[in-house]
Amino acid sequence: MDLIAEQAVLSTLINDAKTLDKYIDIILVDMFYKQQHIEILESIKGLVAQKKPVDFVTLNSEIPNYTEYILDITSEFSFVANIKHYIDILEEKKQVRQTVFYAQEILTMVSDGDDPREFAETYDFNFYKGSEEMENVFKNSYHYLEKIEEEHQSDKMRGIETGYKDIDYKLGGLKGGDLILLGARPSMGKTALALNISTNIAKNNKNVAFFSLEMVKRKLMQRVLFSESRVSQNNLRDKQISINQFDKISKSAATLFNENMYVSDKSNTVLDISYKCKMLKKKHGIDLIVVDHLSLIEESKQFQSETYKVAYDTRKLKLLANELNVPIVLLAQLSRKCEMREDKRPVLSDLRDSGAIEQDADVVMFLYRDEYYNPDTDLKGVAEVLIRKNRDGETGTVPLAWFPSMSRFDNLQR
């Protein structure tokens, strides 16, 4: 602990409005050790949230039992020009306290005989969150009102745009903290749609992490290049790619060269995925995570049944989405039940071990192509995205154009 640094920071916040405005958001309650200092900082933050001035008089009305103490520290320190140095000291001391705490916690886990890989995950999970603190949201209601007004007046979509306007309209984009499940029977195109969405987002200067548990990187990149260049992959199979088509593929590669999509085809556990995403977040930032797919996630620990394993995996991924404030698109294969009905469009109960998935997922979408089952359908070349659950909005059906030879979905022209 460093009580002098704590006093210096509090005194400067009280005595200098410019410093208060600049640093109040990065000075967090858990940086402080002394209870009196914690309560003073909470009162300062409360005044700021209410748009009230912060000074000796307003603080005295908030916490009158600390009048003499506040007077003492504001008189002794008044104003420190190098407040950033003192903030760094508080952050360093906080990290030391956290390290001691987590070391003790890990020793406890070791003595209980838990999986050693869980130790690193637990340590990294808690240490990475680091500065999280409990917040009295009612005290900051004015701040949340501002956010509502900003969102209402802004032309920007709340979440990240997928490139499919009707999906974006219904979902409001892919929002940070959301677990979005994309399910389908085999050969419907769920990997293709996930790749299309990932590429669209990466092309808008966003960082995407794509975990492929089924397909190797080379195959994924091949799909992306043919999809972006709008060249049929059949031409590669038949060795009939023309010079013009090679030129299109080359231009697509050149365009994508400056974008960022990080692919792993080696991660096969939630712990691996979580660790790599946290490292990516620290190094480069991350805007979207895609996991293809749920059934192929492996775990070293034993579960009573597949239902318990699915519950563990979906819960871990939902927590990861919340922690990193990033949307996670999780692909899943549906059971055969839907194929036994006359109308084979999937419903929520077609999810394998659906209870945990329905509970953890903020959005559940299914991909369906009628021509797969009905060759004479009027919906040839059309895929339906069936939004069956949407925690923040409406459900419904979004039709997309489907080009199988290019593994490409497009907005349907009407």
Image (cartoon, rainbow, N blue to C red):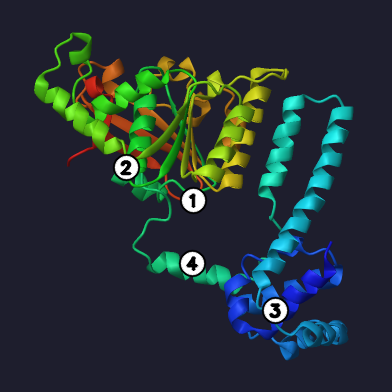
Q: Quadrant of residue 76?
A: bottom right
CA gap between label 3 and label 1 equals: 46 Å
Q: Which mark is residue 18?
A: none
Disc 2 and disc 4 in contact, CB within 8 angstroms: no
Lateral position of residue 370 relative to residue 33, left or right: left
In this rendering, the label closer to the viewer, 3 or 2: 3
Q: Nearer the viewer, residue 213 or 366?
A: 213
Q: Earlier in the sequence, mark 3 or mark 1?
A: 3
Q: Which residue is the site of mark 1?
A: 392
- In the rendered view, would you say 66 is above or below 109? below
Disc 3 and disc 1 in contact, CB within 8 angstroms: no
Disc 3 and disc 4 in contact, CB within 8 angstroms: no
- Label 3 crowd (10 A; few <14 / some 14-19 / many >=20): some
Disc 2 marks which amino acid? Answer: Lys
Secondary structure state at the residue bearing disc 4: helix
In this rendering, the label closer to the viewer, 2 or 4: 2
Q: Quadrant of residue 308?
A: top right
Q: Residue 148: image x %, image y %?
A: 49, 67
Q: Which residue is the site of mark 2?
A: 203
Q: Which residue is the site of mark 4?
A: 148
Disc 1 marks which amino acid? Answer: Asp
Q: Nearer the viewer, residue 79 or 383?
A: 79
Disc 3 and disc 2 in contact, CB within 8 angstroms: no
- In the rendered view, would you say 379 is above or below 103? above
Q: Quadrant of residue 358?
A: top right
Q: Earlier in the sequence, mark 4 or mark 1?
A: 4
CA gap between label 3 and label 4 equals: 36 Å
Write the residue at 61% across / 46% down: 323
Secondary structure state at the residue bearing disc 3: loop
